[in-house]
Image (tube, rainbow, N blue to C red):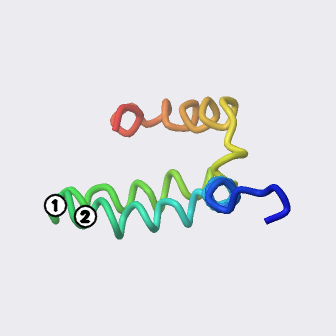
Amino acid sequence: ARGIDPKEHYKKLEIQEKQSITMEDFLNLYMEKHKKVHNKEGTIKRDTPRIRNIILPFLGTKKISEITEEDMISLQDHLSNTPIQFNR
């Protein structure tokens, strides 16, 4: 097949697809496939507004692969004004 290993080709495509996902899309998948399966309802109710109101405004439109250390420091700086949120 023109010297291309199909398994390797699809593996690379899968990695590229995962890296091109936005933080918002990732968090939606995370909430649906992990949080709702592995966490209690109270935890979900507590964490959902934090994700929606804190993380998404800062990082929601960025691709996962484009999030930098500076982005994370900026988010931490913002949260340092609300100490109870900073460590959560």
Image location of residue 7, percent across then percent down: 62, 59
Identified at 50% across, 52% down, the residue is: 54
Q: Is residue 61 visible?
A: no
Look at the numbered disc 2 and give the secondary structure of its residue. Answer: helix
In the rendered view, tell whether residue 15 sits above or below residue 77.
Answer: below
Identified at 58% across, 38% down, the residue is: 75
Left or right of residue 56, residue 9 in this image = right
Q: Few, some or many C-alpha atoms within 10 Å of disc 2 (few <14, some 14-19, many ≥20)?
A: few
Identified at 35% across, 62% down, the residue is: 48
Quadrant where the C terminus is found in the figure: top left
Corner quadrant of residue 46: bottom left
Corner quadrant of residue 13: bottom right
Left or right of residue 23, residue 31 in this image = left
Look at the numbered disc 1 and give the secondary structure of its residue. Answer: helix
Q: Is residue 64 visible?
A: yes
Q: Are marks 2 and 1 in contact (CB under 8 Å)?
A: yes
Image location of residue 9, percent across then percent down: 70, 58
Residue named by callout 2 = 45
Question: Given the image, on which type of amino acid does mark 1 rest?
Answer: Gly
Quadrant where the N terminus is found in the figure: bottom right
Q: Few, some or many C-alpha atoms within 10 Å of disc 1 (few <14, some 14-19, many ≥20)?
A: few
Image location of residue 84, percent across then percent down: 33, 35
Corner quadrant of residue 40: bottom left
In the rendered view, tell whether residue 70 sits above or below residue 64.
Answer: above
Question: Given the image, on which type of amino acid does mark 2 rest?
Answer: Lys
Circle on res. 42: 1
Identified at 77% across, 57% down, the residue is: 4
Q: Nearer the viewer, residue 65 or 17?
A: 17
Q: Nearer the viewer, residue 19 or 43?
A: 19
* CA gap, disc 2 and disc 1: 5 Å
